[in-house]
Image (cartoon, rainbow, N blue to C red):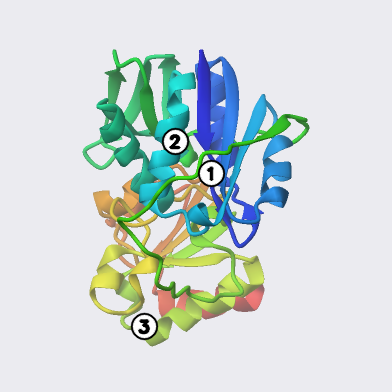
Amino acid sequence: MSILILTEHHDGALAGATAHVVAAAKAIGGDIDVLVAGEGVAAIAEAAAKLDGVSKVRVADNAAYAHQLAEPMSALINELAGDYSHVLAAASTTGKNVLPRVAALKDVAQISEIIAVESPDTFKRPIYAGNAIATVQSEDALKVITVRTTGFDAVSEGGSAGVEAVDFVADNSQSTFIKEELAQSDRPELGAAKVVISGGRGMGNGDNFKLLEGIADKLGAAVGASRAAVDAGFVPNDMQVGQTGKIVAPELYIAVGISGAIQHLAGMKDSKVIVAINKDEEAPIFQVADYGLVADLFDALPELEQKL
């Protein structure tokens, strides 16, 4: 049994999500190979080789994979997949873009967002906004799987896997990279932050999110939002935490003015410690919070920032 993992990397650095996917692969068992595809990715390959449990790093360093477009990436994995029983990727933008195409090319079913491994062919995944957990068994010869990274603790470094080059160059006539517009922030990326403070409809308007930013800067936190706040136009949608936003599991999650709809809870309930600030003591968020403060956020936040 052997497993191929598609790495996550951004701005020339290996993303933390890959270490969580390797943990899922270790739970499945067998030899674990990691695929690093891109242009100028030697440093990323070296970082991937250090992950505990990785047997080999396969490097496809070519301009065809420079922007990890779904078509050439899926063609590359399709070429390599014959050597493997499982293909894994994080349930991220990249993983959700590439792996469904791989599954289609191989004519197999994809298993999405697993949170636990029962056996090499049986997995657990959340359904109904996380209110139920489905146990899914696959009889396909090749298992194509995306991993919800919050379900697995990241592996440590300490490995020394070998690195080999992949010569296959995908021919891509279907898509062309035009440009990308990336949000710039000095704060941690929302999906990888150890501390997250999020605001909901109770913030009142977008300007009031500055109350969260002062606290975030003191805690080294990322700033998120509920779907209600995003739909109201308070903040951009890349800040949304929830079932249709980002799934996060930081060490500390602070929910401010968030009632706690099921869809939001699905995106943050795996956080290690949850703190809720809401003036409605009946708000559902208090049912999952480790610490709850029934207070007006416009009084509580300035005092919290002052004490910090």
The Cα atoms of the two marked residues, 1 and 3, are separated by 28 Å
Q: Of marks 2 and 1, which one's residue comes earlier in the chain?
A: 2
Where 46 sits versus 186, above or below? above
Disc 3 residue type (three-letter): Gly
> Along the line of sight, which residue is nearer the eye, 119 or 287?
119
Q: Is residue 78 left or right of 59 when viewed as pictured? A: left
Q: CA distance from mark 2 to mark 3?
A: 43 Å
Q: Report the side of 129 relative to 290 (left or right).
A: left
Up/down of 94 relative to 304, above or below? above
- Mark 2 vs 3, N-terminal side: 2
Q: Position of residue 202 (x, y in %)?
A: 31, 73
Front disc: 2 or 1: 2
**Quadrant position of residue 56:** top right
Relative to 45, 172 lies left or right:
left
- Of 28 and 308, nearer the camera is 28
Tell me which amino acid carries mark 1.
Answer: Lys
Residue 174 tag number: none
Determine whether the residue tagged by mark 2 lies in a helix, strand or loop: helix
Percent of width and height locating residue 121:
37, 14
Quadrant of the image containing the C terminus = bottom right
Q: Decide: few, some or many residues near mark 1? Use Cα within 10 Å; few <14, some 14-19, many ≥20.
A: some
Q: Which residue is mark 1?
A: 272
Tag 2: amino acid = Ile
Residue under the point 65% across and 34% down: 57
* Viewer-nearest of discs 2 and 3: 2
Question: Does residue 13 appear anywhere in the picture?
Answer: yes
Which residue is denoted by mark 2 in the rendering? 77
Position in image of residue 128 (x %, y %): 21, 38
Kindly identify which residue carries mark 3. Answer: 206
Determine the residue positioned at 51% across, 23% down.
Answer: 3
Give SS at disc 1. loop
Q: Which of the 4 quarters of the picture holds residue 26?
A: top right
